[in-house]
Amino acid sequence: MDCGTFGTLFLLLVLFCLKHLVCDGFLQFGYMFHEKGIYGAAGGIHHAMIHAVFTLFILLAFTSSSEAVLLASLDGIIHYHVDWAKKNLSVGLTVNDQMYWIWFATDQALHHLTYLGVIYLLLSL
């Protein structure tokens, strides 16, 4: 991998980590959190759309709009389903339960693996 490719990869990793912080932290509101476990509910859809839009903003700096829209849509769809599954698998668990943390960590790992997949696809285009 040459320095240019490594620099692009590093920048994308940083941008996706920051995107995740902003979208899962600062821009996730109560109704989103509470509705993520209800398939098709507005809260989960809005949360996933915020992720997709921020992914789109990142990708537009690196690729064409059609490729960026496709990859951002993929990120949003996967994000939605990972959150939905985690919310349903952790019903009744609290921060005092080990399984809560296992599902939480699995959720976060799947989101970051999705970002790695999006970056891989982007750099493979």
Image: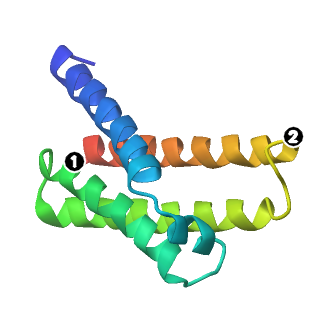
Report the residue that reaches farthest toward the bottom: 40
Q: Nearer the viewer, residue 81 or 125?
A: 81
- The amino acid sitting under disc 2 is Gln
Percent x, y for residue 112? 50, 41
Give the residue at mark 2: 98
Classify residue 88 by image quadrant: bottom right
Give the residue at mark 1: 58
**Nearer the N terminus, badge 2 or badge 1?**
1
Percent x, y for residue 7? 21, 21
Element class at badge 2: helix
Residue sitting at x 48%, y 81%:
42
Residue sitting at x 70%, y 64%:
87
Percent x, y for residue 91? 81, 64
Left/right of residue 103 with respect to residue 13 in the rendered view: right
Left/right of residue 66 with respect to residue 21 in the rendered view: left
Residue sitting at x 69%, y 46%:
104
Residue sitting at x 46%, y 51%:
24
Mark 2–mark 1 Cα distance, whole angstroms, equals 35 Å
Cβ atoms under marks 2 and 1 closer than 8 Å: no
